[in-house]
Image: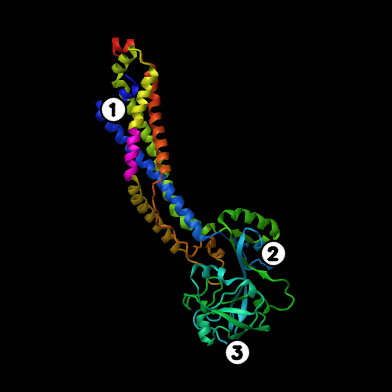
C-alpha cells in the first residue's frame, strides 16, 4: 500500500487526533490570515491618505533653527529662487507668500471685533500670494470664494486684493471696487482693485494664530501689488513660505534633492516639508493596529508550531508498532516521514480553506473596533493641543509648534478588509511551512527507529 493511501486511512481512523490537529491549524490560519488582511487593509488606507493629501512639498520657516531671545526674525528667500524651484520638472503648480502690515485710513475701516488694534490704528496683516487658490485654507475648503476670481501668477504685477466678506460689508465694497492701502512705513500708498471676496468661518473674536488680528481683516493681495507698498530701494522681492504641488508623490525625494542643490545656502532657516506630518497624523492609528496584528500573528504562529510539533511527536510514539511493522515489511523511513508530512499538509489545507470563508468578516469587525479605539484616542490628543498666545512662537512657554495638528487631516478611523488570492497563497505558505517545521523534529525519531527493537522489546 502506498503512503498516500495510508495517510488517508490514518486520518480517518484517528478522527479525534485529526480534529485536534485541524482545530489547531484553524486557529493558526485565522490569526495569520487576520494579520495579513489587516496589513493589506492598512496599506491601502495609507496609500489613499497619501493621495488625499496630495503630492505637496512646503517651504517654510524652521522654527527650531531660530533660537531663543527677543530678536527673532523670520528668514526670507528671494522670489526669483523660488521661481527656479517652481520651474523644476517635478512641479505641477506652485505658489509663495510674504506678509507685511497694511493700514486702512480715511473712509476705509477695519471690521469690528477681535483684539484692539494689535498692529496699530487701522493696521492689519496683508499677505502677498502668487496663487491664492493653492493656499491650504482654500484648497481644504475652509475658506470659500464667494465672488470674483482667485489671484494667479498672471496677476502677479497687478494691484488686486482678496478681502473677507465682513471687511467688504463694513466698507460697502464689491468685486471691481477700489480701495487704498498704506504701507508699513505709514507713508507709501497704493490703490487696489477688489478681485474677489471670500468667507473665513472663524469668528471675529478669535484672533488669527499667526498674525494676531481679527480674521475678518486679513487681506490677500498679489505679490507685485503689495510690494508697491514697500519703501523704495528695499531690493528684490523676498518671500517667507512657498508651496509646491508635484506631478506625483513618488518624485518628492527627487524634488527635494534638486531644490537643495539649486537653492543652496538660501534655504538656511527653512525646511522642505513633504507634508509627511499630515500623512503621519492620519495614519498613526493604522500603524498601531498593524503592529499589534503583526505581533499577534507571529506569536500565534510560533505557539502553533510548538503545539503541532508536540502533537506529531506524540503521534509518532503512539504509532511505533505500526511503523515497526512497516519497516519490517521493507518500507523506507523516508516514506514514513512523507506520510507524516502529507497528513499534516492535508489537514492544514482544509483548515486554511475553511478559515478563508469567515476570517475576512471577523477581521473586519475586530480590526474596525480596534482602529476606532486608536483613532478616538489620537483625535482626543490632537484636540487637546493649545497654540501659544498671539505674537508668541511658543518657545518660551515650552510649546513645540511641530506638535501643532494639521487641519483637515483627521486620523483614519475606517478600513476595508478584502480577501485576495495572494492573501490565501501567503497564508497557505506560512501554514504549510509551520506544518512541515512541526514534522521536522519527530522525523528524527522516525529515522532512529529499529524494527527489530520495536517488535521484540516495544521500544
* Residue corresponding to mark 1: 11
Residue 246 vs residue 118, the one in the foreground = 246
Q: Residue at x 38, y 29 (%)?
A: 438
Q: Nearer the viewer, mark 3 or mark 1?
A: 1
Q: Position of residue 227 (x, y in %)?
A: 67, 76
Query: In the rendering, at what x and y percent does residue 390 appear?
Result: 54, 72
Image quadrant in which the N terminus is located: top left
> Where residue 81 is drawn, which disc sits there?
2
On screen, 404 above or below 312?
A: below
Residue 353: in magenta span: yes
Report the span colored magenta. Answer: 347-358
Residue sitting nearer the eye, 110 or 334: 334
Residue 392, by quadrant, is bottom right
Residue 170 seen in the figure = yes
Q: Nearer the viewer, mark 1 or mark 2?
A: 1
Tag 3 residue: 106
Query: CA separation, marks 1 and 2?
Result: 76 Å
Task: State the image coordinates of residue 276 (x, y, percent, origin top left).
Answer: 54, 57
Amino acid at each position: 500500500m502506498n503512503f498516500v493511501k495510508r495517510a488517508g486511512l490514518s486520518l480517518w481512523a484517528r478522527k479525534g487526533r485529526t480534529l485536534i490537529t485541524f482545530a489547531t491549524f484553524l486557529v493558526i490560519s485565522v490569526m495569520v490570515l487576520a494579520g495579513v488582511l489587516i496589513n493589506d487593509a492598512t496599506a491601502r488606507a495609507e496609500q489613499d491618505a497619501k493621495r488625499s493629501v496630495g503630492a505637496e512639498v512646503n517651504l517654510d520657516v524652521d522654527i527650531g533653527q531660530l533660537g531663543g531671545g527677543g530678536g527673532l526674525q523670520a528668514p526670507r528667500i528671494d522670489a526669483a529662487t523660488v521661481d527656479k524651484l517652481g520651474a523644476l520638472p517635478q512641479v505641477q503648480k506652485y505658489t509663495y507668500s510674504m506678509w507685511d502690515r497694511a493700514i486702512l485710513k480715511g473712509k476705509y475701516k477695519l471690521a469690528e471685533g477681535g483684539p484692539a488694534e494689535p498692529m496699530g490704528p487701522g493696521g492689519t496683516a496683508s499677505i502677498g500670494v502668487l496663487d491664492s487658490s493653492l493656499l491650504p485654507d482654500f484648497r481644504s475648503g475652509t475658506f470659500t470664494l464667494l465672488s470674483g476670481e482667485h489671484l494667479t501668477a498672471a496677476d502677479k504685477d497687478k494691484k488686486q486684493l482678496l478681502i473677507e466678506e465682513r471687511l467688504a460689508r463694513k466698507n460697502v465694497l464689491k468685486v471691481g471696487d477700489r480701495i487704498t492701502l498704506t504701507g508699513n512705513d505709514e507713508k507709501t500708498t497704493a490703490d487696489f482693485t477688489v478681485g474677489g471676496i471670500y468667507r473665513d468661518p472663524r469668528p471675529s473674536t478669535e484672533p488669527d494664530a499667526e498674525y494676531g488680528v481679527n480674521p475678518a481683516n486679513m487681506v490677500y493681495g498679489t505679490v507685485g501689488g503689495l510690494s508697491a507698498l514697500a519703501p523704495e530701494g528695499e531690493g528684490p522681492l523676498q518671500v517667507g513660505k512657498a508651496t509646491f504641488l508635484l506631478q506625483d508623490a513618488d518624485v518628492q525625494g527627487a524634488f527635494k534633492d534638486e531644490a537643495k542643490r539649486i537653492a543652496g545656502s538660501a534655504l538656511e532657516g527653512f525646511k522642505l516639508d513633504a507634508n509627511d506630518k499630515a500623512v503621519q497624523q492620519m495614519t498613526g492609528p493604522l500603524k498601531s493596529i498593524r503592529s499589534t496584528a503583526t505581533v499577534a500573528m507571529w506569536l500565534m504562529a510560533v505557539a502553533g508550531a510548538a503545539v503541532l510539533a508536540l502533537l506529531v511527536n506524540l503521534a509518532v510514539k503512539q504509532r511505533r508498532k505500526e511503523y515497526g511493522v512497516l519497516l519490517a515489511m521493507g518500507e523506507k523511513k523516508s516514506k514514513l516521514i512523507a506520510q507524516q508530512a502529507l497528513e499534516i499538509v492535508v489537514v492544514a489545507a482544509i483548515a486554511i480553506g475553511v478559515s478563508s470563508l469567515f476570517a475576512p468578516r471577523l477581521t473586519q469587525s475586530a480590526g474596525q473596533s480596534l482602529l476606532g479605539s486608536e483613532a478616538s484616542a489620537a483625535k482626543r490628543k490632537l484636540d487637546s493641543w493649545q497654540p501659544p498666545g498671539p505674537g508668541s512662537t511658543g518657545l518660551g512657554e515650552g510649546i513645540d509648534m511641530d506638535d501643532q495638528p494639521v487641519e483637515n487631516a483627521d486620523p483614519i478611523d475606517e478600513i476595508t478588509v478584502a480577501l485576495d488570492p495572494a492573501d490565501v497563497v501567503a497564508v497557505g505558505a506560512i501554514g504549510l511551512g509551520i506544518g512541515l517545521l512541526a514534522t521536522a523534529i519527530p522525523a528524527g525519531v522516525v529515522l532512529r527507529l529499529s524494527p527489530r527493537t520495536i517488535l521484540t522489546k516495544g521500544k
